[in-house]
Image (spheres, rainbow, N blue to C red):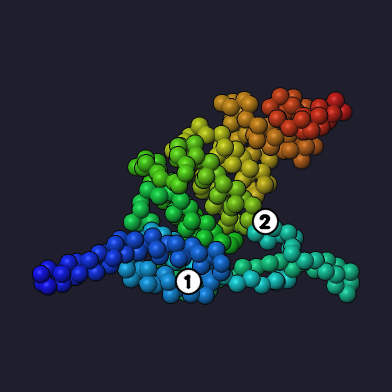
Amino acid sequence: MKRISILFLAIFMALPAFSQALTTRQAYKDRYQLLVSKLGDDGVGIETLLNQWAEDYPDDLDMLLGKFSYYLAKSQSETIERMDRSKYLGAGPALTLKDSLGNDVNYFQVTNFDDARFGLATQAIDRAIGLNQNRLDLRFYKISALISYEKESPDMALSDLKALIDYQGVSHPRWEYPDMEVTDEVFAASVQEYCYVFFRIGSPSSFEAFREISQKMLAYFPDDPVFQTNLGSYELVYKQNNKAALKIYKKVLKKHPDDYPTIKNCVLLARSDKNTKLEKKYLPMLIRTTTDEAEKAAATARLNAL
């Protein structure tokens, strides 16, 4: 009888440990989320928790995302720097003062990165992507981080984005994205957001990235007016070649006569060239396609005044 009691006791004592092992992954996640909510992504104690989590569950996605967030946040520091320019990375100055001659002196907020810590962040997200090939959000996390890190020279971000577009165009993966269904339209719209970021940065390298990504998308979606119009905007804004831009815009409108962004760009181009005849051609189209009543009224008034 005594033997049976000891055996039963041993089994009973083993059960909580077994149950705890099954719930430890969730327990790590709960503890991590609590710490982040109280202390931020790089708060005290989070690295220790993440290392313990990684030791027990080295392939856990939430742990890898936690490491990515921790080291990305830890790698960054902010400074205010004087620059002889009106914009930096598409943003205006954080502060403008006057020098002794009364001239504006612009100061911009600059994010600096510690290379070693940023490297640890990319290692974590690369590991997460490797284990979850069709999680589109993970790939976007990395590309967005690279854009922030590379600033006016987005070479690695461009390379990753082009590879992602090729993977989409050739393999047609069944993308997973939390709480969202990824269609071709959603994918294209997401890529266009990156095009907008490159365009807004406004450096020679970022404009070239804007062009390359648009051309890459057109290789798989040749009739997409968004990326066709992007090429016109590249010529118009960066190359300042209005003739080449107009040629592209006309080509877009031949297939998509009601494409509002293209029509709006044509009006702006005509106004820039002081080409009244051209502006009178596109203003009625703008009035027809815009959904903004204020813009419609302004375009109508402008047309009547010409």
Q: Position of residue 289 (x, y in %)?
A: 68, 27
Callout 2: helix, strand or loop?
Answer: loop
Residue named by callout 1:
46
Residue type at tag 1 = Ile
Q: Residues within 10 Å of mark 1 (few under 14, many from 20)?
A: many
Q: How many numbered markers are drawn?
A: 2
- The residue at the far right in this view is 101
Residue nearest the observer in this picture, 59 or 230? 59
> Is residue 68 visible in the rendered structure shown here?
no
Determine the image quadrant of residue 1: bottom left
Residue type at tag 2 = Gly
Q: Is residue 206 above or below residue 123?
A: above
Q: Earlier in the sequence, mark 2 or mark 1?
A: 1
In the picture provided, is 23 more to the left or to the right than 32?
left
Q: Position of residue 297 (x, y in %)?
A: 81, 29
Residue named by callout 2:
90
In the picture provided, is 121 more to the left or to the right than 293?
left
Q: Residue at x 52, y 45 (%)?
A: 190
> Is residue 211 visible in the rendered structure shown here?
yes
Q: Residues within 10 Å of mark 2 (few under 14, many from 20)?
A: some
Residue nearest the observer in this picture, 83 or 187? 187
Q: Residue at x 48, y 53 (%)?
A: 140
- Foreground tag (2 vs 1): 1
Q: Which mark is residue 128?
A: none
Q: Position of residue 41 (x, y in %)?
A: 53, 66
Callout 1: helix, strand or loop?
Answer: helix
Q: Residue at x 15, y 72 (%)?
A: 6
Q: Residue at x 68, y 40 (%)?
A: 242
